[in-house]
Each structure stands twice: as C-alpha cells, then as structure tokens.
Amino acid sequence: MAALGLPAQERENQTRPAGTRTAAGVTWRAAAISFAVILISAPAMFYGEVVWYKGFWSNAVPASWPLAVLFLLTAAMGLPVLRRLQLTRPELLTIYCVVLVATPLLSLNVLFWALSQAISYYYFGAVFPEWETTFLHLIPPWFSPSSTAAVTNYFEGNATVPWSEWLAPLAAWSSLLIALFFANFCLLSLVQKQWIRHERLTFPLAQIPLETVQGEPGKRAHLQRNGMFWIGMAIALSAGVLSTLSLRLPALPSLSPRMTLMAAHVVGPLSALGRVDLLLQPWLLALAYIVPTEISFSVWFLWLARIGLTALSIAIGNEPGSAEDWWRFSFPAPYNQATGAVLVLALWALWGARRHLLRAVRIAFTWRGGGDDDEPLPYRWAMLGLIISFAWLVAFFLMAGCRPWFAIGFPAVIMGAYLSYARLQAEAALDTSFWWFNDVVQMPIGPTNLTPQELISLYTAGFVSAPMPSVVFSACSINSLTSFKIAESHGGNLRRLTYLLFFAFLFALLLGSFVALTGTYHLGFIETKGGTGNTLVANVLRVYGHDIYYDITYDVGPSPEGVFWIGVGGAVCIALGLLRLRLLWWPLHPVGYILSNSLPQAMGTFPFFIAWAVKSLVIRYGGLHLYRATLPLAVGLIVGDLLNTTLWNVAALATHGRF
C-alpha cells in the first residue's frame, strides 16, 4: 500500500528485483554528450555568471541548466534528423546526473571564488600596509601567486596567465576540492541505501527529471505526455517570461511574483513581522507541494512561532527588528538555532543509519565478497576513500601551519554540514542559511585563541564552508546523492555512474580552472560584475582581509551566548526527532524546524501554507489517486519556471550581458 503514494517511475522501480541493474544508461555516447555539455558550460557560465552576472546556471535549488539540458535533448530526439540517435531514458537521465554534479564547480561561487580569495589579500593589501606586518607574510606561498605582476594582472587584465606561478596554488586547491568531494562522495555512497531504500526519503529534486522524461526500456525517450504537465509548464513559462520582461523593460507594467501585503513596522513588537511579502513563484509553490505535508506544515507553523518569539523578545526590551533579519545572539537567535540543528542533524542521520553502516564495516573489512554489488562503490573502497581523503584534508591544513586539533576539527565540521545539507535536500529540497562555518569554529573559543595561520586558512577556504549549500562547493557532493536516487529509480548501474561522475568532476575542475584563469587575466577581475558588484564573492573578497587583520590585532573572545543558542537548536532538533519516533500523530518535523529558522519569510510562510493547504485538501477529498494525478502539474510548473531562467541566461549570453 505504501507504493500507492509514489510517482509512476518509483512504482515501476518497486517491481524490479532488488539489486537488478542495467548498464544501458551509462554508455559511451551518454558520456560523450555529458562531457560536451561541460565543455560548453565552462565558458558560458564564466561569462554569464562572472563577467556579466546575469543569473545562476547550475548552482541553485532547483538547478535550471541541468534540467534545461535534459528537456532540450529529449525534445531534440523527436526531430527527424536525430531520430536515429534514439537516446533512451536511462541515457538522458545519466547526462542529467553528470551535468548536475559537475557544472556547479564552474560557477562564480566556487572556482572563481577559490582562485580569487588568496590573491585578493595581496591586491587589496597594497593600500593597507598594516596587513603586511600582520598576516601577508604568513600566507603559505603555495596558496597564491604573490609577485606584483601576477597579482596586478589578475585584477587589471590585458595579460596572459603566469602558469609557472599558478602551478602550485592550482595543485593545492584542486587537491583540496578533490579530497573534499571524494570524502563526501564516499560518505554519501555509504548512507544512500539507508536513505533511499530503508527510510524511503522523498527526494523531491529527483522526482523532477524522473517525471519529465519517460520511455520504455530500449526505446527512444520522450517528454511527459500528461496534459497537466504541459499546462503547468505553459503557465509557469508564460508568467516567468512576462515577469522578467517587465523587469528589463520599465515601460511594461510590473508583473512581479512578489506582492507586499504589509509595510514593515519600525518600533514595537509588530516590527518582528518585518515587511510581509506574498511570494507566488511557481517553482517554490510546486516544490512545497511535492515535499511531505508534515514538512510543509512545520515550515509555515514554526515560522509563525519564530515571529512570535521575536515579538516577545522585543516586548521584554530587545531592540526592534524583523524575525528575518535577527542575525543576533540574543533571544530567540534563530540562525544560531538553525546552525545547531544542522550540526545535530548530521549526527542524527549517522545514528539512524548505524546498523546499515556497521554492516558495511563488516563487509568492508572481511574477505568475504557480496553484499555491496549494487552500491555506488564497494564498501571497502568507500571506507578507504573516506579515510584517505579526510587524511589529505587534515594534511592540507597541517601544511598550512594549523594545529592538529584545527586541522581535524575544521574538515569534520564541513563534512558534517555537507551530510546535513544532503539530508535536507533529500527530504525538503531547499536551501537554508545559517551562520558561516568560520563563525561556528570561532564561537566556542574566540578568534584570539586561533593562530594567524588558522585564521588565514579559515577565511581562505570560505568557498567550501559558506552556509548556502546550493551556491557553494557543497552542491557537487549533495547532487551526487540525488544522482544515486535517480539511478536507483530507473535501474541504472550505480557503479558505472559513480566512475563517470568522478571523471566528469575532474574534467570540469581542469577545464573550469583554465577558463577562469585565462578569462580573468584577459578581462581583469575589476572588469567583472560578478567580482565587483553586489555578489557574495565580491562582498567576501572586500572584507575577509579586514576580518583576518581585525581578528589577529584585537582581543576577541568566545561567544558563550552564541554557543548556548546553537546548543538549544541542537536540543530542539533531537526533541522533535524523538517525538516523531515515539508519537505517530506528532506533526512537527525537525527539517521543518531548520527551514523555518533560516528561510526568508516570503519563502517560508505563504508558499508553504498554500501548498500544505492544497495538498491536504487534495489527499483528504481525492485520495492518493488525485494527488498522483496532480503531480505532473506541479512538475510542469517547476520545469516551466526553470526553462524561463535558462532562456534569460542564454539571452544574456547572446546580447553580451545587455539583456
């Protein structure tokens, strides 16, 4: 009976004997097309995101570019000239998985940030002589080129890349990225069966490509033929095109999906509401409709609780401010609570998978074969890969001058966060914002108890530790878990897909580094909107050098209040998890608690309330049959919205960023 609530593709998978796998999806032509897409994506994303900053391509939730590639390739299969190619559904889904995992690496917020961070200290430090005596001379020489010509040309352009000076930094940071990716890849490969088969998490993001592309084994794939899908796509695409046009052409009437219902109060407890906006983005409403009702209910209900606690805090004497902007350690400290819950969620996930992991350990370290034939990696190789990769992360920070406890603790925090991010997307599919993890490391002990080398390492590695999963490096490893779910659903060969994903990641890393360096030395960092505008990278590069100088120069102690509220968030997460296990009727979900304390109000309250109310009514009066019938409409809304995003990204490329 449990299978009745699942999409058609998932129900088909349940009829397949466990462990049955085909190699049809991971073919040479699927691999060739995947690498060709990466080859096209590298310069397109550099110009689209870095040079002109006209929207994100691949590192968002949901990601628009991988889905656009899947949609366009499937549609192209219907053209007479391409009918002989006849890509099958598993092949198309394999291409989607490769693009999903590899292309986030090419984005503004990963490779461009990684290459720009350390070298920016030398460029911006030229006008701050105190930096030289404080920390510039302590930066490891293999972090970045430091010669005047290499630094100046990187930022001002009209030059070629001094490859001899970049070889060591490229090798160092590439090794860090590879080790972190492979460590998390191995960890996720160990828990994926527990989450996919045993706990049966919903994986909303995997449902989108699975519902979009259909087809029988061995035959040419086709797009969803359900009329509801095309209605949803037409609605979302039309609304998106008109809305975006109204932004780019001021003469047109505004058609924004965001409507202000109430202006913000400046004083009094009502200031906790902030500006009340109604956000009616199709993809968000549809995604909230797909996630389980207990999560959607928890998000909007606990958001109201967050507002109430903030109003109470203001009423008892705290400075007025909206719940959304309450980036403080004082009660109710929502972002501290979310951070604590995220850290605990990783431990909770490992504890829930303990029997499966113990079985994996027994299989890995005995000479008896079998038991892991349908895993992405043999248990033995996954365990060894995790150990070796983590050991290299520790060695990296030890060579950077950090003490052993830091060299072990900082990568452990990052890997724990990545595991939580993966769990969040497996259940709710959305991004969340917490405290930056360099702040998390500093809160218990204070910057004054970190050495200058540790502070330099902490800030310079910010591109792997920022608290927004989909826009930083963590997207690569998170998306690999979604790829495992997709392969599991269509019976693909997980082992072969794993090898393809890893080689695609290496290819994207090499190609992306080449494109980013040659492009930046040609154009100049200061000529890119992604590097100098109001972007995450631009803001970080402007302040991190000052942060390092400040933390070294001034005596900044620990933050007991911040640590306390992180502990409160962890405790609440555990309590909600235990209540869900003990009381079947308990309605509040720990994932909803995390989202409610980190999402903006416009995303967390009304969209989730609307989706929860509609889904509850559909299931109550139409049952699971009616819900399954409406699911293509929700997927169509998401596909249409994301195709609109890709449309404007391509338009920006065609017009050199002018439109």
Image (spheres, rainbow, N blue to C red):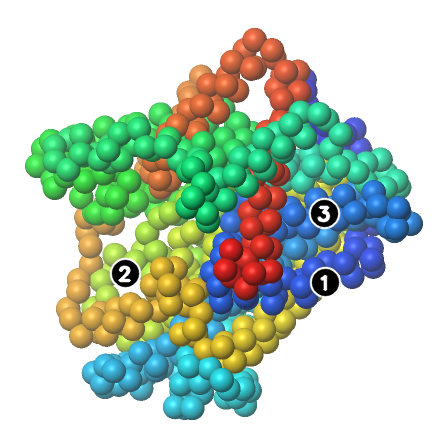
Q: Which quarter of the rendered picture does the N terminus lie within?
A: top right
On the image, numbered disc 1 is attached to which residue?
Answer: 35
Q: Which mark is residue 72?
A: 3
- Indicate the quadrant where residue 540 lies: bottom left
Q: Distance from label 3 to label 2 (Cα)? A: 47 Å
Residue at left offset 22%, top offset 69%: 551
Residue at left offset 18%, top offset 34%: 265
> On the picture, is 655 further left or further right than 632?
left
Q: Distance from label 2 to label 1 (Cα)? A: 41 Å
- Indicate the quadrant where residue 381 lies: bottom right
C-beta proximity under 8 Å, tags 3 and 2: no
Position of 511 relative to 438 (above/below):
below
- Position in image of residue 166 (x %, y %): 51, 84
Q: Secondary structure at mark 3?
A: helix
Q: Secondary structure at mark 1?
A: helix
Mark nearest the camera among 3 and 2 is 3
Amino acid at dot 1: Phe
Residue at left offset 79%, top offset 55%: 30
